[in-house]
Image (cartoon, rainbow, N blue to C red):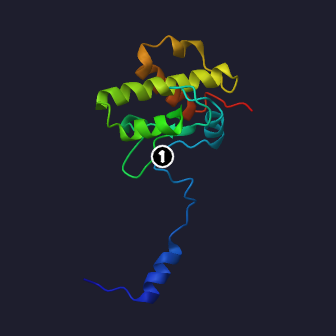
Amino acid sequence: MTKISPRSAAQIAATVPTVDCETVQRGNYRNKALLAAVRLLPCVKCGMIGVHAAHSNRLIHGKGRGIKASDAAIMALCPADHYEIDNGKNYTKRDLETYQDAYIVKTYAALERDGKINIPAHVWKLHGNAEIALELIRMQEDGALWVHF
């Protein structure tokens, strides 16, 4: 095994480019305006005011070990409901997936209702919350949906 001297290590480190942590999210979409708009909504489960912009916990939405899901896979949930979804002790995995898809769809519907985002009519004609949620996430990540303030 070759030992690297401290001087050599410093020279190597100097050649490695630095990257803004906000930029490197392993390809996951980030949108502060979307998160801010979601925090203004009531909880999509119970209607409580004062919500978290809760990220999905599903792999299909970009979640990984130590990696938050895409900001496009977002749910307006009060602290109690956010905790319940994140810990999921009272639900099966299938139930959690179903609820998260439904909450993502309800969050986007609330954003549209409040005039914060425009969603094309064809999206609402898709079959089931899972398909609608995936299409909304894809469109948001592709820049097809805009948050208005």
Quadrant in which residue 44 is drawn: top right
Instruction: Tell me residue 148's x, y (percent).
Output: 72, 30
Front position in the image: 40 or 4: 40
- In depth, the one of 34 and 85 nearer the eye is 85
Q: Quadrant of the N terminus?
A: bottom left
Indicate whether 113 appears above or below 32. Answer: above
Amino acid type shown at disc 1:
Gly
Residue 107 percent coordinates (x, y): 56, 26
User: Can residue 55 be seen by looking at this rendering?
Assistant: no
Image quadrant where residue 58 sits: top left
Residue in view at x 43 percent, y 88 percent: 6
Q: Quick one: which residue is furthest to the right in this view?
A: 149
Q: How many marks?
A: 1
* Residue at mark 1: 27
Left or right relative to 117: residue 66 = left
Image height of 132 relative to 29, above or below: above
Depth check: 8 or 94 in front?
Answer: 94
Relative side of 112 to 123, left or right: right
Q: Is residue 111 visible?
A: yes
Q: Residue at x 68, y 27 (%)?
A: 116
- Secondary structure at numbered mark 1: loop
The residue shown at (54%, 13%) is: 122
Identified at 33% across, 26% down, the residue is 95
Residue 119 falls in image quadrant = top right
Residue 81: % across, % down: 47, 34
Screen quadrant of the C terminus: top right
- Closer to us: 143 or 43: 43
User: Circle 1: is it few (<14), some (14-19), or many (20+) Cα within 10 Å?
Assistant: few
